[in-house]
Amino acid sequence: MTAALDLASGEFRSLRREGQRLIARRLTAAYTILEDTVSTRRLLDNGKFPYSQVSDSLIVVGNAAEEVSRLLSKPLIPLLNHGEIDEQDPVSRQVCAWMIDLLLPLTNQPNALCLMTCPRGDSQEQASDNWTAQFLEHIVQLQGYDTMIMPPATPLALSELEETGFTGVGLVFGAEMISFSLLHHSRPIVEVRFKKGYSELLERYCQTHQKLRWDSAGNSYLDLEGIESWMASGEMSFSSPSSAGESWLRDACTELLLSAWFSFKRKILNCHESYLNAALPIAISGMPAMIPGFQEVVRESLLLSGVPIRPSVIRSAAFEPFSVARGLYLQGELQAGSPFPARFEVDAA
C-alpha cells in the first residue's frame, strides 16, 4: 500500500489508493479554541462542526476552524507556527495527530509506505526545526507506515514534467521554505532548501501597511488570512500592479526569490552535465504561483541571479493543489513496484 502526505504550513494534503479509487483529502493546518459553554456547543452541533474537548475548552480543527473563526470572530491558530510545532504545546501536538489520522487512516497492511514532505526539512537535518519533522514522521509511523521524507520540489517535478522525460526544474515557493530540484530523467541532480518563505513577507506587509483584524474581545492580530485570501482571489496581479500593495509584494517576492536562487546557484555550479546547455522547463507551485504574473517574477529573478539555466517555459503546476502529493504518490508506487492503473476514479475533498 502506498500513500502520499504533503504537510505544508498552511494545509495538509493526502493521496492514497483504495482499489481503483484514488482518495484525495485536504485540511487547513489550523485550529481555533472556544469556551466550553452550552451555547457554543449548541452552535457547533447545529452547524455540524466537529469538535473535541480539551480541559475546559472546545477545539475545532481544519476547514471547520476557518468557518467557525469567521463566524465567532475568534483567532485562527496556525498548527505549525513558522513551520514548527512547539515541543511544549500539547494542544498543537494533539491536534496534529488528530488531523493526520483524518487524512491517513490506520493500516495493518505489510510494507505500507508513506512518502511525505515537511514544512522546513527532514528529520535527519541537524537544525532546530528537525524536532517537528521527527514528530510528524513518528505520527505517520504510528498509523502503520514506513516513511520517507522528500523535499517538495522533487515530487513537484515528477508530477509536472512527464512531457520532457522528467527533466527540468521544480520550484515550490512555500510559506516557510523555498525548495528547488533539478531532475534529469527523474533522477534528482541538485536539491536545495532555502529556509525562508512567503509567510515572512506577509507579516512584514501587514506590519508595514497596518493590516489588522480584531477578535470578539477586542484583541488585534495581523490579518494574514485576509492577505492570503487576496493573493488567492485572482484579483492581485504581478504583471500590471494596480496598487502600492501589489507593487510592494511583487518586489518583496522578487528579492526573496533572488536570494533563494543564489543558494541554488552555489550547488549547480559544481554540475557540468551537457543537458544544462539545453533549455529546461520550470514548474512552479505555492501560493504566490497562483498570482498572475508570478512567472515573470521567476524569470526576472532567475536572470538577475546568473544561475546557468535557460528556461524553455515557466508554468504553474497543472495538478494543484495536489501536485506535490501526486509526485510523492507516483514515486511511492514506483518504489513499491506496484502496477499503475491507466485510469483512476478520483474521490477528492
Image: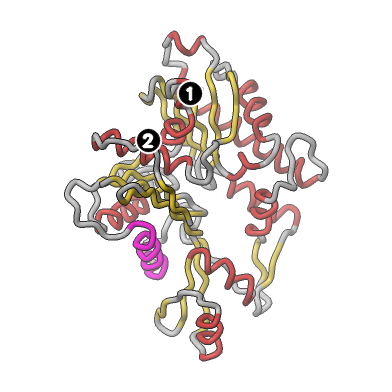
| Residue for badge 2 | 342
Residue 162: x, y in percent? Answer: 45, 26
Q: Residue furthest left?
A: 110
Instruction: Name the element at disc 1.
Output: helix
> What residue is rendered at 48% in x and 32% in y?
160
- Would residue 237 appear left or right of 123 to someone viewing this image? right
Residue 282 position by quadrant: top right
Classify mark 2: residues with Cα within 10 Å, few (<14), some (14-19) or many (20+).
few
Residue depicted at 45% across the width and 34% down the height: 159
- Count of numbered circles on the image: 2
Q: Which residue is mark 1?
A: 163
190 w.r.t. 76: above or below: above
Q: Which amino acid, by three-letter code, is at mark 1?
A: Glu
Q: Which residues are magenta?
A: 89-104
Q: For the residues marked 1 and 2, what is the alpha-carbon distance in whole angstroms?
A: 17 Å
Task: Give yes or no for residue 96 being in the magenta stretch.
Answer: yes
Residue farthest toward the bottom in the current orientation of the protein: 38
